[in-house]
Amino acid sequence: MTFPNAFENLNVLSQQTLLSPTALHDAVPASDRAMRTVSQARQTVANILQGSDPRLLVVVGPCSIHDIPAAMDYAQRLKALAAEVQDQLFVVMRVYFEKPRTTVGWKGLINDPHMDDSFRIEEGLQIARKLLVDLNDMGLPCGTEALDPITPQYLGDLIAWSAIGARTTESQTHRELASGLSSPVGFKNGTDGSLDVAVNAMLSAAQPHAFLGINEFGQVALTHTRGNAFGHLILRGGSVPNYDSVSVAEAADELAAAKLPVNIVVDCSHANSRKNHNLQSLVLKDVVGQLVEGNRAIKGVMLESNIQEGNQKLGKPEDLRYGVSITDACLGWTATEDALRDAALRLASRSM
Ligand SMILES: O=C[C@H](O)[C@H](O)COP(=O)(O)O
Ligand SMILES: C=C(OP(=O)(O)O)C(=O)O
């Protein structure tokens, strides 16, 4: 019997073999400096989660990357700001290449780097890996959403922190994936605000799993994982925001009841800002206030920020405004600087 026979792949139009993870690593190798950035940052995030580093983890950057020169421009600014606030804040750049859509839409730079439905995924992987090497080479650690279960084999060595998104936290595939990630991994609460799915995800991803994956040569492989020791909860709001002190206390109680480490990251964007980018600064102020008053459960925050504020509709690349998000609306650069400087200043007054 040939494959496919008359009863399978009825809705598959075509398939094209892509380069293997090892071929991509050879084509775009990580420098020693880049690898040092990754390993030091992973250790720092682990230290923050374990409480031996008192700083606040800040994952900040564009909602999605679509323009490499703009991403490098943003990164230069962020590197300088990160150095300025480093006594209080540990800054990781948000470098999101994969977008989970509510229905349909542009799925990110890896899926469609030319933003024209040409879906040059191999080129997307190459561009993404080159950017990650360059950012880590600058000494700027990178965080991303782990969405596609195959992508980490191509890029995972360059990631210091990962998130599992609100739409996939409940998915077994993503829990298995998280159990094998080399970086600490945060799980978002569900889009409806439910914490249970994220708590269950943390319990699951901390355990070893066996599942179908790919190996470094791109072959299908039975994959056994160790379990991720650094899972944590990300509060991103749901039908209502959940960054306030009551919601944070409830989340901390839920983690403790599940005998999980009480480690919370607050996403100042998404439902916590009611998708109004300007409200992110106010959410951050509130979270910093909780920390100043002695909260020990909050270990980090996330912000969606770009060179210019707001967002724009995806159009022809030549029509796009420079430094403006083509997915969720972002804080602009000046507001980002103000928000992080203010946070650092107020956190400096904390008695540790
Ligand atoms: O952060 C990004 C978006 O909120 C997420 O990808 C969903 O986007 P959509 O609702 O525009 O599809
Ligand atoms: C999709 C994202 O967030 P969430 O999963 O919280 O919607 C994101 O941060 O890009």
Image: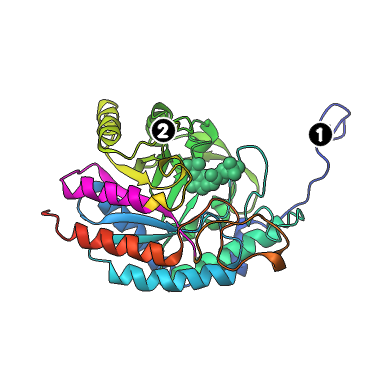
Residue visible at 30% across and 58% down?
Answer: 44
Label ID, residue 240: 2
Q: Residues within 10 Å of mark 1 (few under 14, many from 20)?
A: few
Q: Position of residue 50 (x, y in %)?
A: 24, 47
Q: Which residues are magenta?
A: 281-306
The front one of 208 and 99 is: 99
Horizontal side, residue 287 vs residue 308: left or right: left
- SS for tag 1? loop
Residue 215, image x and y in percent? 59, 49
**In magenta segment, residue 342:** no
The tally of labels here is: 2
Front one among 222 and 321: 321
| Residue occupying the point 83% across, 41% down | 13
Q: In this rendering, does residue 339 appear at all?
A: yes
Residue highlighted by disc 1 = 11
- Circle 2: residue type: Val
Q: Nearer the viewer, mark 1 or mark 2?
A: 2
Give the image location of residue 132, x and y in percent: 51, 65
